[in-house]
Image (tube, rainbow, N blue to C red):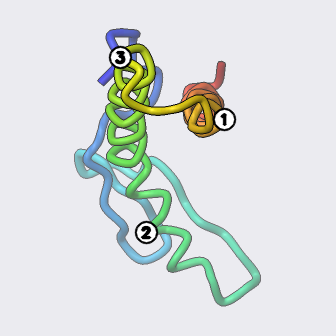
Amino acid sequence: MSTTEVKYTPGPWKADGTRVVANKKAVALVVSLAEYAHPDTYLIAAAPELLEALEQAHTLLGELLIDNVLGEDVIPVHDAMMAAIRKAKGE
């Protein structure tokens, strides 16, 4: 994971109905008029692990680009990964 300070509740998070729980405390409540609130809860609960995996993949992809193992056609993917990481961190 990144060496920057974590500004969100560290994982793991778990889905509990329409709540997302970390360390026995609710960190999010999914409120929706649609029938999709419960699946959204699972997605939100996976956020810390997804962010960590994305950061690791971004680092690896960057190393492969530097070593010229991959072509320039993957640069947009690398950039999209960084944009998503920044968005997740509120940057």
Q: Earlier in the sequence, mark 1 or mark 3?
A: 3
Are there few (<14), some (14-19), or many (20+) residues within 10 Å of tag 2? some
Quadrant in the rendering for residue 20: bottom left
Query: Is 1 situated above or below 20?
Result: above
User: Residue sitting at 44 percent across and 49 percent down?
Assistant: 47
Residue type of the residue flagged with mark 3: Asp
Residue type marked 2: Tyr
Q: Nearer the viewer, residue 77 or 21?
A: 77
Quadrant placement of the N terminus:
top left
Q: CA distance from mark 1 to mark 3?
A: 17 Å
Residue wearing tag 2:
42
Q: Earlier in the sequence, mark 2 or mark 1?
A: 2
Distance from disc 2 to disc 1, alpha carbons, whole Å, reads: 28 Å
Question: Label 1 near label 2: C-beta < 8 Å?
Answer: no
Nearest to the observer: residue 50 or residue 42: 50
Q: Is residue 78 above or below residue 24?
A: above
Name the residue at 33% across, 28% down: 60
Q: On the picture, is 80 further left or further right than 21?
A: right
Give the quarter of the figure containing the C terminus. top right
Q: Which mark is residue 87?
A: none
Mark 1–mark 3 CB contact (< 8 Å): no
Q: Find disc 1 in the rendering and name its residue.
A: 76
Q: Amino acid at mark 1?
A: Pro
Q: Residue 34 falls in which quadrant of the image? A: bottom right
* SS assignment at label 1: helix
Percent across and percent down for residue 4 are 40, 10
Residue under label 3, please give it: 67
Q: Secondary structure at mark 3?
A: loop
Mark 2 or mark 3, which is nearer the start of the sequence? 2
